[in-house]
Structures are given as structure tokens and as C-alpha cells.
Image: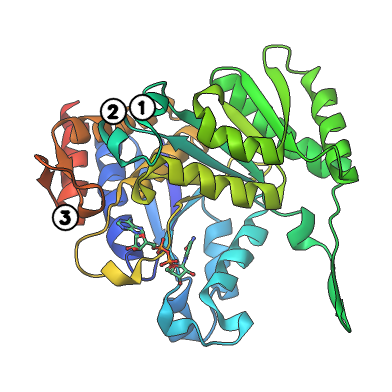
Amino acid sequence: MDKHIAVIRGDGIGPEIVEQALKVLQQVGLRFGHTFHITDVGMGGCAVDRWGDPLPEEELKKCLAADSVLLGAVGGPRWNQLPGPMRPEKGLLRLRAGLGVYANNRPAKIWPQLADASPLKRELVDQGIDFILVRELTGGLYFGEHRTEGDTATDVLTYSVPEIERIGRIAFETARKRRGRLCSVEKSNVLDTSRLWKKVMHQLAEAYPDVELTDMLVDNCAMQIVKNPAQFDVLVTENMFGDILSDEASMITGSIGMIPSSSLGDGTRGLYEPIHGSAPDIAGKDLANPVGTILSAAMMLRCSFGMSAEADVVEKAVDAYLNAGFRTADIMQEGMKQVGCRTCGELIAGFLEKG
Ligand code: NAD
């Protein structure tokens, strides 16, 4: 199969981690007979330096012409003082809007080899933590009207039935491909938008008899994620609740460098990126953990290209790398072998070749 991937290396550790994911993809291509055509796209601080714009139209067009987009990270202190539209993060917002991606999917999984890195008690971790949080990305409070009049500020929270339906469908489809359990998270005891959310989710459930739908209030969910995270398979929630819960969910895994994410819209094209930022403190030092980016590439294979066997092989190669005792500095443990970003990528590509 031939696939075109737009690659945004970005700033800070972005170029280092993306390079490792590309090594792994190249190995996947060799093993399975696929050709991945890579188009480099300039976005973020590097694009501001070059063109005075964090995502020029021409660069966005390259993403729109691709089958999918792989992103490292953007931003850094060098660009923090710039006015709003020139900030690297604006490029990211424009990219998400341009690609029409409205569903952000973040797995929260604890690799058994890294169980000690989790801030949770060992007995909770040993129950197995492996869930996905599906967050609505382009509606709700963040996209409502914002206004300040005198000493009063107002932010408007709106959701429509079609907006809830489309994110709901993605969540049900995700649950269907996993363990078949979906928990819809809202605040229906207080908010009208949440009551509509709940009603629409239950209407959708009729088309997914193989998925068990439950409801949970967001404040309870925040507690349950640390009290009994093994109960969850797939969670679906609106934009602001998802923003907060997804950070909580990633923290319980204890290793920000290991977590991938995808953002999807109506078609198969997605935006895939690790959940962390550009880590300027370790940029250029060969210290970054590229596994989150490598696993993002695996998500791209599975979700955008329909290459599940290929994605499984990448995940198994990461497992083999951890089993062999290799660790980047951020997850280093006693008795393990510390490796840099480059070696980590080479080792995982090597395990993939052998595995
Ligand atoms: P960060 O995620 O970049 O870093 C937080 C801490 O985690 C740092 O100590 C860093 O060294 C460490 N870390 C992050 N990723 C790592 C990895 N792969 N391997 C090892 N250690 C890792 O968050 P921050 O410092 O708050 O933000 C830095 C910049 O990144 C800011 O400009 C921010 O706006 C930007 N940012 C970008 C994105 C994105 O591109 N999607 C997301 C978040 C933050």
C-alpha cells in the first residue's frame, strides 16, 4: 500500500522524536511491503522564524493533501512573548480546525514494566489500567462566546445534537473495537447541555447493542479515575471536562513521554501526536523519550490506514524494548539500561524487524 504522511517535526524535542517514529515506520514498510511517502510541513515556532506565521496556508494545504498527519510538538520560551496570532499554539489550533478533527482520543495505559512510575498504589495498578478517553474537541465552552462587561465575565456553553452524535459515534465505534464498554461523562444534574448529551448518547446506544453504555457525573469520574481506574474501557465527554480528565488520566500512567494521541474527524485522515509538549529543557540533548510519538504512528496505522497487524507489531516491539530493560532517562529505573532518544528508536525498529 502507498500512503502519504504529512510530518510536522516542530520545535524543541519535536524533530528528535519524530525522526525515531519515521525509522519505525520505515521498518514497517519494509516488513509489510508498504511505501510511506513523507512530506515535511513547517508549523510552530520554526514556521514563525521562517515565514512570520505559525502555519502558512501552503503548509496547511500539504496536510490536507496527505492521508494523515504526524506531529512532534510545537512551542517554546523563545516564542512566548509574541502576540496571539503569531504564537506557535495558534498553528496547532488552525491545523485542528483545518483538518476538521473533532474527536481527541487519548489512551491511558500502564505498561506493566513501568508500574512503579505510576503515582497510584500498586494493588490498583496490578488490576490493569487500560482505557481511552474520547474528548469532544471543537465545541462547548472553549468555542462559545466569551465576553467581559465591567465586573462581569461570561463564557457560553453550547452543544447541538449533531455535535454530540458525531463524537458519540466515534466513542461507540472505539468501544466496539475494544472491550465493548462505554462510559459517558457529564454533569446532567446541573447543566442542560449535559442532559442533552446524556439523551443523545442513549439514543445512539440503540444502534450499538454490543456496547454497554453507562453514565457518570464528571466529579465522580475525577474520583473514580484515581480510585478504581481498571473499571474503564472507553470514556466519552465534552471539551472542557475532557481537557481536565485527560490530563488526570495521563498522570496516573506516570510517564508523559509514553502516551500517544489521535484526533479524528469524519474521514480516515487524522492528526497523531504524543501528548507532551516540546520539552525545551531537554531539546537537542538526545534525552527525549520518543515512545509516545512511535505509538502515535502505530495509532495512525490502525485508525487511519486500517493496518491493525502493522500497529500490533509496533506495539509489540515497544513491549520487547521495555522487556529487554531499556529505558530513556525520564523512566529510568534501577538495574535498567539507560539509552538516548536515537538509540531508543533504533532498538524499537530493530525489535520490529526481528519480532
Ligand atoms: P512539556 O510536556 O513540553 O514538558 C513537561 C516536562 O516533561 C518537562 O520536564 C519535559 O522535559 C518532560 N517531557 C516532556 N516530554 C518528554 C519526553 N518525550 N521525554 C522525556 N521528557 C519529556 O510541557 P511544558 O514544559 O509545559 O511545555 C513546553 C512547550 O511545549 C510550551 O511552549 C508549550 O506551549 C508547548 N506544548 C506543546 C504541545 C503540542 O505541541 N501539542 C502540547 C503541550 C505543550
Residue drawn at the location 54% of the way across and 81% of the way down? 53
In the rendered image, which quarter contains the N terminus? top left
In the rendered image, which quarter contains the C terminus? top left
Q: Disc 3 marks which residue?
A: 340
Q: Is residue 323 found left or right of 21 in the rendered image?
A: left
Label 2, label 3: how far apart the Cα atoms are: 20 Å
Image coordinates for residue 261, horizontal then vertical, percent: 49, 45
Q: Nearer the viewer, mark 2 or mark 3?
A: 3
| Of the image marks 3 and 1, the number of the one nearer the N terminus | 1
Residue drawn at the location 32% of the way across and 64% of the way down? 15
Q: Are marks 3 and 1 in contact (CB under 8 Å)?
A: no
Q: Disc 2 marks which residue?
A: 316
Which residue is more in the foreground, 240 or 175? 240
Badge 2 marks a residue whose secondary structure is helix
Image coordinates for residue 310, horizontal then vertical, percent: 36, 29
Task: Check the image and report above or below for 293 versus 41.
Answer: above
| Residue type indicated by callout 3 | Gly
Label 1, label 2: how far apart the Cα atoms are: 6 Å
